Amino acid sequence: MVKKEELKDWAILIDGSSFIYRAYFAIQGYLSTSRGFPTKAIFGVTQMLIKILKEFEPQTIVWFADEKGPTFRHLAFAEYKAQRPGMPDDLKVQISYIKKIVSSLGIPFLSKEGFEADDLISTFVHKFPIKSIIVAPDKDLYALVSERTILYDPVREVFIDKEEFLKKFGFPPERFPEFRALVGDPSDNIKGVPGVGEKTAKELILRFKSLEELFENLHKVTPLKLREALAKNKERVFENLSLMRLRTDVELPSHDLSFYQRREPDLLTLKSLFKELEFKKFLKEFNFPSEEIEYSLLKVDEGSLDKHLEKSDLIGFSLKKEEIKLFNLGLNREVFLAPSDKECLSLPLNEQTLSRLTQKRFCFFDLKENLHELKKTFKVEPFFEALSNFDDVKLMAYLLDPGKKSYELSELAFHYLDVNLKETDEPCKKAIVVRRLGSALKDEVSKEGLKEWYQSVEVPLSYVLFEMEDAGVKIDLSYVKELSQEFSERLKAIEEKLYELAGFRFNPRSPQEVAKVLFDKLKLPKVKNTPKGEQPSTDVEVLEELRGQHPIVEYLLQYRNLYKLKSTYLDVFLKQTSLKDHRLRTTYHQTGTATGRLSSQNPNLQNIPVKGEEGLKIRRAFIAEEGYYLFSLDYSQIELRILAHFSQDENLISSFLRGEDIHTKTACEVFGVKPEDVSPEMRRVAKVINFGIAYGMSPYGLAKELNIDRHSAELYIKRYFERYPQVKSYIEEIIKFAQETGYVKTISGRKRYIPEIFSPNKNLRDLGFRMAINTPIQGSAADLMKSAMVALAQEMKQRGLKSKILLQVHDELILEVPEEELEVVRSLAIEVMEEPFSRLSLPIRLSVPIKVNFAYGRSWADCKEQ
């Protein structure tokens, strides 16, 4: 039994090709950079190499690689490995990076034209009689196993030494090529003797000392059928043996063992590669040295501030979050400013200083969060007028790569500046990092053609979102308490019904217990397993599939929906609504989605159900202050209008220009009926088709959504594209563009990278296609909404109106408007939302008119269309 700890200092000989394929197929799913470059094999190889280096600490380690082109075996046998599929395209592009990483880790790299890596390893083992571990699960190398050579599979962590080999085969390892010559090797396209399997071959090897002896004594072999098969295939067996024997005479680059010892790793190159490939795990693991920020700290006062800032074109800003006492005159804040990369100014912040700072060009990390911090002590209204002077490195980084998982300052500092930044680092260091990031990212934003969009929309929007978060929305707490009690009673009643139908009490919130009820007790069919595959799934998709097969399923769906609404919304409203002003404050994220849509949390108001009695009841909790109304302004069919603009489909554009009901129009086209003959069901189907096409829905998805057969779904889509042919052309063109470039663009020019479109996995690739179709549409709808929010907020401020934007949910804005401003805000809001780009002087024009539905009421639920 091999013990890993006893193998330290043994030479490590890696079969590179086998190692790469093992790494590639060992990792499930698809790995890539945020820009779409595949990295699964590189990551797997790197991970296994680091593990090997740590566990075995070898002095001698060599990576043996196959060369391109034919080997001596191909020349001897043209069919050698001919049946093997070529290397996957997404693996091919990773090989050069793997070579760089192997080299940067200090591992010698060996290959030889005309020979396989196995022959090089065999030659090395014979020329250097040292203890060696061959890292390869490949049976081709079994022949090299000896007292001083063992094989190791790094994925399964299994060793094969001589003892293990003898247990398995019963004959010495050096005779393994003879065994394979009889059996053949389908993976190498080498045919063995017909009728000779492993058991028979093993018996023959044990009985005869060599293949020569076997064929000299064929008369002793029984049964007759086996003897005849061997006699007939004698030539083939010896040809096989010549192919399967590993060479021991390949010319190596050096006969000195020290040549094959590990070199010093090239940490700079490794770090650069890991950053490029976005391998955060390895960047942390290696703890690479990073650039140190050196600076001088000057404490300044208001009088000398201008002198220190006058020559700076960009000033990094960092706020110390703790309040400090200034001359016993009350609470103040300390601010840190970086006018250069080597200088930091510290000064107490007061109203006068704050007002002067708004006249300079400042760079923030997360402007919105800084505004919230400043608001604790100061009035921040002057900042609104000075927004054109402000930069936000978080927003710039997001615009450049909206698919990143994190936009924390430490992540940006490391990625762009090679600086390790900790949360505990002093504010001066942060201010300098922010300034340097601002300088670097501004140029990149300009190169991408996003400067105007960034300055006109994204930066001002952060202030609008700050005001929305600060204002909050009023909640009727008494009503919420009553509704919560009602939901609790209904849940209790459903629980009792569930117990009755199951025949015993169980926890309906436990997937494991629900699975026992459905599949063990009631014997309902299992639809699918959980993601980890450990047990049958009971998620909503499964319950929908089981609907109608037992009454308990309907009650489980009701229970889950009601429990989710209560726990996600009502319980959170009661917990988070301020008892001081009865207003609930959510947090909006400008950098939270790859499409550009806003997201919210604590609580997430984006997912409040639009339809259904329960959703309406929850919306009734949102109320206006006394003397105010809630305004609902909702973009009508905005994604379909954007689809018409991008596709330039004449039929779709003309429908919108004529103000037709697009769903009724599509129903007419798909079902071949007149508008007056369109039934509600036909219109519903048409609506699903319209939005399904915009979201890249497949016939399978449409069939599932409409609960129809796939043939009918295909027919609906076929008819749709016959009526709207340019929509089909647009979809084909945008997919092609994404495949060629790796990204798609929204109407503002923002890019979203789609690595999934390159995945060898069909499901992921199809997801990439859907993203390519939908992102320009959904992302452009987000562009429109964000522009409208900025333009409307600016107009209302300029007119001195008291009305405020409170919420943004999907394609809807909720405003709180005093009674005396009802008419002016109604007309203003609709005008601005229908033409937001022109209001901001942005050079974007849509080919179809934008329509805004308007409603108002005392509560969100009571908003009635006007």
Image (cartoon, grey):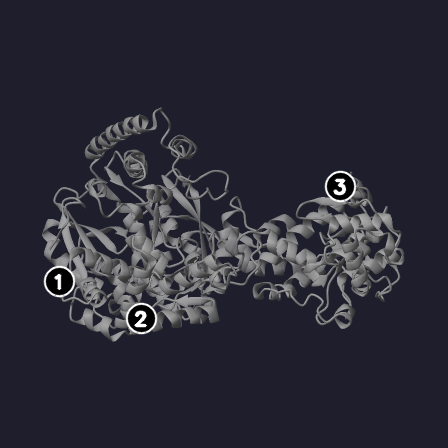
Q: Which residue is mark 2?
A: 727
Circle 3: is it few (<14), some (14-19), or many (20+) Cα within 10 Å? Answer: few
Q: Secondary structure at mark 2?
A: helix
The residue that label 1 is drawn on is: 677
Of all residues, the one furthest to the front in this rendering is 224
Residue 74, by quadrant, is: bottom right
Q: Which mark is residue 4?
A: 3
**x, y (%) of residue 151?**
76, 49
**Residue 59 location (% of width, % of height):** 80, 51
Say what secondary structure mark 3 lies in. helix
Q: Marks 3 and 1: which is nearer the front?
A: 1
- Give the residue at x 74% y 59%: 192
Q: Position of residue 148 (x, y in %)?
A: 85, 47
From this view, report whether residue 570 is shown above or below residue 436: above
Answer few, some or many: residues within 10 Å of disc 1's Cα (few below 14, many 20 plus, some between 14 and 19). few
Q: Is residue 230 left or right of residue 816?
A: right
The mark nearer the N terminus, 3 or 1, is 3
Which amino acid type is shown beneath numbered disc 3? Lys
Considering the image in quadrants, where does the C terminus appear?
bottom left
Q: Residue at x 12, y 44 (%)?
A: 627
